[in-house]
């Protein structure tokens, strides 16, 4: 392996450690934030099963966003659904042999990248065109959107503009997983795409993108509306009562 191959190996492991470590730390902190009050957004479910159904609708269909703003919901849902398909399609680089369902979605995932770019374009235009959204948009929001668009464009280019050696790239990825590093294809598009993905992985735990796991810890979404049936007592408050 040459110096460039070694650099990408080191960057890949470093970005993965930052991503997994940072994500675990932020989830640990979310889980420890006290929820001293019952504050579910009404109308709220009155059972745990109802909360699970509500969270499923929120995560899969973006229910609250749909009720709030239809255009934002449309662009946001298209982006996230396409992203999920693209990520699932990339599992072919991490598995040998490739799982059957991953093979089946390949034709759809190929065009999902274009849908992802369309969704991102809509979300970015919204931040620039809608005055009240533009007011609360900071430089970091534009940088994250630019990073995602760059990832989408370089990824689409490797598929539609200049095809790369995916066999060699898969060998590189599997080599990382097996702790047996292999050379990366010296294709500028592939290297640029991978470098941008590594940057995204490194900044993910420290950016607004963390809303993905954060939604599961939102008390306005994950609480049962049972304040009239049972007293809500946070663990720290229960410990305080017992110490008296």
Image: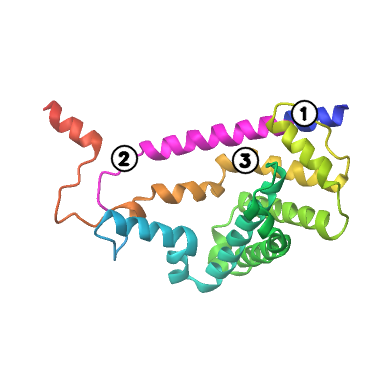
User: Dot 3: within a 10 Å radius of its alpha carbon, few (fewer than 14), some, or many (20 or more) residues?
Assistant: some
Check disc 3 and report the residue beneath it: 203
Q: Residue at x 49, y 61 (%)?
A: 60
Of callouts 1 and 3, which one flags the residue occurring earlier in the amino acid sequence?
Answer: 1
Gap between marks 1 and 3, in whole Å?
24 Å
- Is residue 133 located in the magenta-colored stretch of the structure? no
Q: In the displayed structure, does residue 98 sit left or right of residue 35?
A: right
Q: Return the residue nearer the eye: 36 or 224.
A: 224
- The quarter of the displayed image where residue 204 is located: top right
Q: How many marks?
A: 3
Q: Residue at x 77, y 41 (%)?
A: 170
- Give the x, y percent position of residue 63: 44, 66
Q: Is residue 194 above or below residue 61?
A: above
Q: Is residue 204 above or below residue 114?
A: above
Tell me the mark number nearer the camera, choosing from 1 and 3. 1
**SS for tag 3?**
helix
Dominant SS type (magenta): helix
Check disc 1 and report the residue beneath it: 181
Gap between marks 1 and 2, in whole Å?
44 Å
**SS for tag 2?**
loop
Of the 4 image quadrants, the one containing the N terminus is top right
Span of residues in magenta: 11-38
Q: Residue at x 55, y 31 (%)?
A: 21
Of callouts 2 and 3, which one flags the residue occurring earlier in the amino acid sequence?
Answer: 2
**SS for tag 1?**
loop
Gap between marks 2 and 3, in whole Å?
26 Å
Q: Residue at x 57, y 35 (%)?
A: 20
Check disc 2 and report the residue beneath it: 34
Q: In the displayed structure, does residue 212 sit left or right of residue 92?
A: left
Tell me the mark number nearer the camera, choosing from 1 and 2. 1
Of callouts 1 and 2, which one flags the residue occurring earlier in the amino acid sequence?
Answer: 2
């Amino acid at each position: 392996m040459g110096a460039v191959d070694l650099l990408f190996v080191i960057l890949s492991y470093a970005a993965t450690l930052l991503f997994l470590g940072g994500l675990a730390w932020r989830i640990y902190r979310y889980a420890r934030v006290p929820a001293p009050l019952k504050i579910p957004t009404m109308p709220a479910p009155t059972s745990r099963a109802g909360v699970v159904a509500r969270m499923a609708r929120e995560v899969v269909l973006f229910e609250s966003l749909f009720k709030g703003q239809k255009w934002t919901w449309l662009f946001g849902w298209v982006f996230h659904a396409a992203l999920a398909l693209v990520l699932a399609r990339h599992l072919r680089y991490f598995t040998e042999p490739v799982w059957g369902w991953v093979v089946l979605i390949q034709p759809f995932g190929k065009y999902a990248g274009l849908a992802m770019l369309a969704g991102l374009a809509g979300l970015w235009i919204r931040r620039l065109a809608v005055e009240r959204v533009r007011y609360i948009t900071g430089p970091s929001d534009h940088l994250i959107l630019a990073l995602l668009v760059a990832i989408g464009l370089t990824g689409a280019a490797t598929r539609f503009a200049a095809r790369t050696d995916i066999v060699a790239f898969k060998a590189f990825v599997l080599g990382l997983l097996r702790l047996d590093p292999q050379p990366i294809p010296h294709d500028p598009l592939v290297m640029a795409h991978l470098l941008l993905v590594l940057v995204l992985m490194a900044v993910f735990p420290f950016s607004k993108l963390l809303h993905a796991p954060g939604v599961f810890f939102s008390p306005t979404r994950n609480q049962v509306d049972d304040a009239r049936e049972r007293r809500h007592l946070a663990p720290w408050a229960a410990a305080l009562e017992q110490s008296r």
